[in-house]
Image (cartoon, helix red, strand yellow):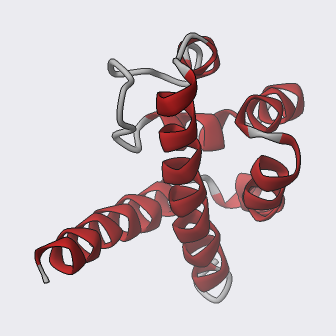
Amino acid sequence: MANQTTQLLRDQARALHAYNAVAEVPIDKRADYEIAVNDLGATILRSGLCAALANLQRRKASYLLKHLAAADLPGLESPDATTLFAEIRKLDPETYMLVSRELLAVAKWLKRAAQADEGGS
């Protein structure tokens, strides 16, 4: 029961973070943001976290990188959009897998928030 409650609270925090993050994306950037966030989870699963982050850097998806860095990720010391990739590359394999799972969950909520916001923009 306690584990289920902890998971619910974590998901609630992720959801709140996601909806607040999407709300701060300027209207003219939302289409590109949604494309990047829709691809993120699949890219993490298909190619790995580092490849997914490299893809976001290549796309210059600065808002999404900022939102991922602000997601309170385990094992990372307050990364920002410019240091997130470097900090993740330094992680030990166990922490890397933990951060990968956490970012998959964050990506899921960001995708939901971006889809829900379509009607509001």
Q: Examine the image and state in which quarter residue 115 appears.
A: bottom right
38 to 115, vertically: above or below: above
Residue 101 horizontal/vertical position (percent): 55, 52
Quadrant where the N terminus sits is bottom left
Nearest the camera: 30 or 102?
A: 102
Residue at the left extreme, as displayed: 2
Nearest the camera: 66 or 51?
A: 51
Is residue 32 at least partly visible in the picture? no
Q: Residue at x 74, y 32 (%)?
A: 53
Residue 83 horizontal/vertical position (percent): 55, 13
69 to 27, vertically: above or below: above
Task: Please state the total of marks drawn on the protein image.
Answer: 0
Q: Residue at x 39, y 23 (%)?
A: 76
Q: Residue at x 59, y 68 (%)?
A: 108
Left-right relation of 51 to 13: right
Q: Examine the image and state in which quarter residue 104 appears.
A: bottom right
Residue 38 horizontal/vertical position (percent): 78, 65
Residue at the bottom extreme, as displayed: 119
Quadrant where the C terminus sits is bottom right
Is residue 116 at least partly visible in the picture? yes
Left-right relation of 96 to 77: right
Left-right relation of 32 to 112: right
62 to 113, vertically: above or below: above
1 to 78, vertically: above or below: below
Q: Residue at x 84, y 60 (%)?
A: 35
Nearest the camera: 80 or 92?
A: 92
Q: Examine the image and state in which quarter residue 62 appears.
A: top right
Residue 14 horizontal/vertical position (percent): 38, 62
Residue at the front extreme, as displayed: 94
